[in-house]
Image: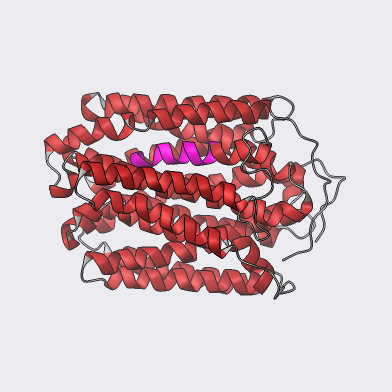
Amino acid sequence: MTKAATADGGWADVLSEGRLPLFALICLGVWLNAADSLVTATIMPSVGKALGGYAFFGWATAGFLLGSVLAGASAGLLAQRFGLRRAMAGAALLYAAGCALSAAAPEIMGFLAGRIMQGVGGGWVIGFCSVAIGLLFPDRTLARVYAASTSIWGIATLISPLLGGLFADAGAWRWVFWFFAAQAAAVALVALKLLPKGDADEGAAVAWPQLVMVALAISAIGYADVAGEVLVAGLLTAAGVVLLAVTVRFDATQAARLLPIGSADLRAIPGAGYATMFLTTAASMGFSVYGPVVLQTLRGYSALEAGYVIAVEAMAWTGAALPVAHLAGRWPDRLIFIGAVLVTAGLGLCALAFGHWPLPAVVAGAGLLGAGFGLSSAFMSQKVITALPIGERAIGSAAIMTVRLTGGAAGAALAAVVANMLGFAEGVTAQVAEAVSFWVFVAVLPVAALGVWTAGRLAAARAEPAPDQAAPAA
C-alpha cells in the first residue's frame, strides 16, 4: 500500500485507497484498550474488597502498564518479523487469556498476574495499531487518524463506566473480564480476516537489553509502593527514574533500538516529543487510579457515579481533539504548548477540588486535564512521525505508545508510593482518602511543569517533513 500525494488529507482521504478495513481494525484495537482501562478503574474498589491486597492497589494499573510497555516496545520489530496479521491475532488471544485468568483468580496475586498478561497482549495490539498508522497512512492524514482513535476513548467513556458500575454494584465484577476475553477473541478473528499478511523478516532484531532495563526500572518504581519504609520507597523510585533515563541514552548507541534516532536529545523533535508524552502521561495517572476510590469514600458515590466523573477526562479529550484535527500552519505547535499548560492547570484544580469543593469544580479539573491532552496529543504524534525518515517510522510509531505506556506505568506506581505513604495500604478511611485526594495531585505538579517546558521546546523545533511515501507493509 502506498501513500498518495494528491488528496487533501480530509476524512474521505483517510478512508480512501482501501484503507477503510485497516482503519476499522485500528478502532477495534483502541477500543479494547480504552474500555479495559476505564472499566478496571471503575471496578477496582470492588476487586480490592473481594480479594484484599490494598497495598497492591496501584499494581492493578501499573502491572497492566508494565506488560504493555514491554510488549509495545517490541511491536514494531515483531510486526516486521511475523507480519501484522499473525502478530495482531496472537496478541489479541494472549490478552483474552489474561482476562480469563483475572476473572477466575481466587486471590489478588492471581488477579495481578492476569492483569500483566492483559498488559502484554493489549500492549502488542495497540502497538501494532500504531505501527499500521505510521506506515500505511499518509502524513497529511495522521492528525485525523490519531484524533479518530481518540474518539474511541470518548465512546468508551460513555459505555465503560456504565458497564463497570453495573457489574460492580451487582457484585459481579468477574464477568467484566469474561466479557473482554470474548471481545479480544473477536479482534483476533477480525485481524486474520482484514489485515494483509505481509512479509515476515526473520532477521528483525529485538532490543532485549533495553527491554530488560525498562522492566527493571518500572519494577523498581512499582515495588516502592509496597516497600514499607519511606526512605526505601524513595530510593527505589529514584533508581527507577534514573534507570529509565540511562536506558534512553544507552538505546541511542545500539543497533537494535526501541526509539528512533534523536530520542535522547531534547533539542530534536523526537526527544522533545517523547519527553512531553512521558511527563504529561505520568503526571496524570493518579487521577484515574485513585480518583474513583476517593470519590466513593469521601462523597459516598456508587462505582457507577464515580466512574462517570472520572470519565469526564476522556470525554473532554475527545471533545477537544476532533474539532481541531484539521488545523494547520502554526496552530499545531500552539496547541502542543497550550495542551501541556491545561494538563498542569487541571491537576492543580483537582488537588483543590477532590476533597471538599463542589462537584462542578471536580468536573472542571477533569475537563481541563482531558482537554489538554485532546488539543495536543494528535499533533505531538504527527510532528514526531513526520520528522522521521521512512526507515525509522516502524520503531518511531511503536515508540509513541511505548513512551506513553512507560509514563503511565511510572505515574501509576509513583501515585501508589504517595498514597501508601499516607496510609492507603492499611485501609481506605475518610481521613486517608482526604489526604490522598490532595497529595497525589500536588506531588506530580513538578513533573507536569517539566512537561510544559519540553512541550515548549517541541513547539519551537523545526524539521523538514519526510517524503510522503509509505514503507512496505509489515
Name the colouring of the figure.
secondary structure
425 up-or-down from 295: above or below: below
Drawn side of residue 241 relative to residue 462, left or right? left
Q: Nearer the viewer, residue 35 or 2?
A: 2
Q: Is residue 285 magenta?
A: yes
Q: Give the image location of residue 98, x and y in percent.
A: 39, 70
User: Is residue 443 visible to us here?
Assistant: yes
Q: Residue furthest right?
A: 6
Q: Kindly identify the residue that appears in the image at 43 percent across and 44 percent down.
A: 241
The residue range painted magenta reads 276-287
Q: Kindly identify the residue that appears in the image at 66 percent across and 51 percent down.
A: 396
Drawn side of residue 375 relative to residue 437, left or right? right
Q: Kindly identify the residue that appears in the image at 48 percent across and 66 percent down.
A: 121
Prevailing secondary structure of the magenta residues: helix
Q: Give the image location of residue 56, x and y in percent.
A: 25, 55
Q: Kindly identify the residue that appears in the image at 24 percent across and 23 percent down.
A: 357
Q: Could you say which quadrant of the image residue 322 lies in?
A: top right
Q: Could you say which quadrant of the image residue 182 lies in?
A: bottom left
Drawn side of residue 293 relative to residue 240, left or right? left
Q: Nearer the viewer, residue 422 or 187?
A: 422
271 up-or-down from 368: above or below: below
Quadrant placement of the N terminus: bottom right
Q: Is residue 272 magenta?
A: no
Q: Give the image location of residue 67, x and y in percent.
A: 44, 61
